[in-house]
């Protein structure tokens, strides 16, 4: 590979990495007291961001006894995102943490209906 092509490839890879970092949703944990944290869903919870979101959420869950979920900014979810939400709820309950969440994101309700999901742990949080 010529030096020019190598530089172009390196610049393209760097630009792609920077763009991905800029577009990746960030989980926000806002501690309201010593044991309660808010898990704020990103605007998109899709396969592209599921692994990153999962890692961030697991850390939040492990560090707090009471968790409040805020889905107010979530506007797009895919099957992987819905599976991740179910896994998060299951994990929270399996480690005996307190979960406070009443789903307000229409995309979650729509996705549950479209996929025919009937998961009792999830259903009790849906509106």
Image: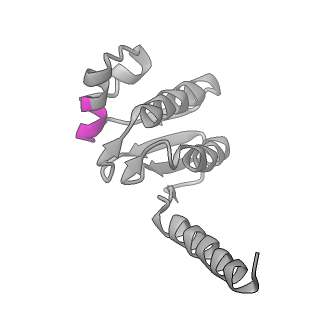
* Residue at the image position 32 percent from the left and 21 percent from the top: 115
Q: Position of residue 7 (x, y in %)?
A: 69, 83
Residue in front for this viewpoint, 110 or 91? 110
**Span of residues in magenta:** 105-110
Displayed quadrant of residue 97: top right
Q: Which residue is drawn at the image coordinates 61% and 26% (left, top)?
A: 96
- Whether 86 is among the magenta residues is no
How is the model colour-coded?
one colour
Quadrant (top left, top right, bottom left, bottom right) of the N terminus? bottom right
Closer to us: 76 or 55: 76
Residue 14 is at least partly visible in this image: yes
- Report the quarter where the C terminus lies: top left
**Magenta stretch: dominant secondary structure:** helix
**Rendered view: 99 above or below 124:** below
- Is residue 104 at all visible to an observer of this figure? no
Q: Is residue 38 above or below residue 24?
A: above
Which residue lies at the image location 67% right of the left edge and 42% below the top edge? 62
Name the residue located 24 percent from the left edge and 31 percent from the top edge: 110
């Amino acid at each position: 590979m010529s030096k020019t092509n190598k530089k172009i490839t390196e610049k393209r890879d760097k630009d792609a990495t920077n763009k991905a970092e800029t577009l990746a949703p960030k989980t926000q944990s806002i501690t309201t007291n010593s044991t309660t944290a808010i898990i704020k869903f990103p605007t998109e919870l899709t396969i592209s961001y599921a692994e990153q979101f999962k890692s961030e959420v697991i850390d939040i869950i492990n560090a707090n006894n009471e968790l409040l979920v805020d889905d107010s900014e979530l506007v797009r979810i895919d099957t992987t995102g819905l599976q991740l939400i179910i896994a998060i709820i299951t994990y929270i309950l399996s480690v005996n943490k307190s979960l406070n969440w009443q789903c307000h994101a229409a995309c979650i309700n729509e996705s549950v209906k479209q996929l025919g999901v009937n998961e009792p742990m999830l259903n009790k949080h849906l509106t």
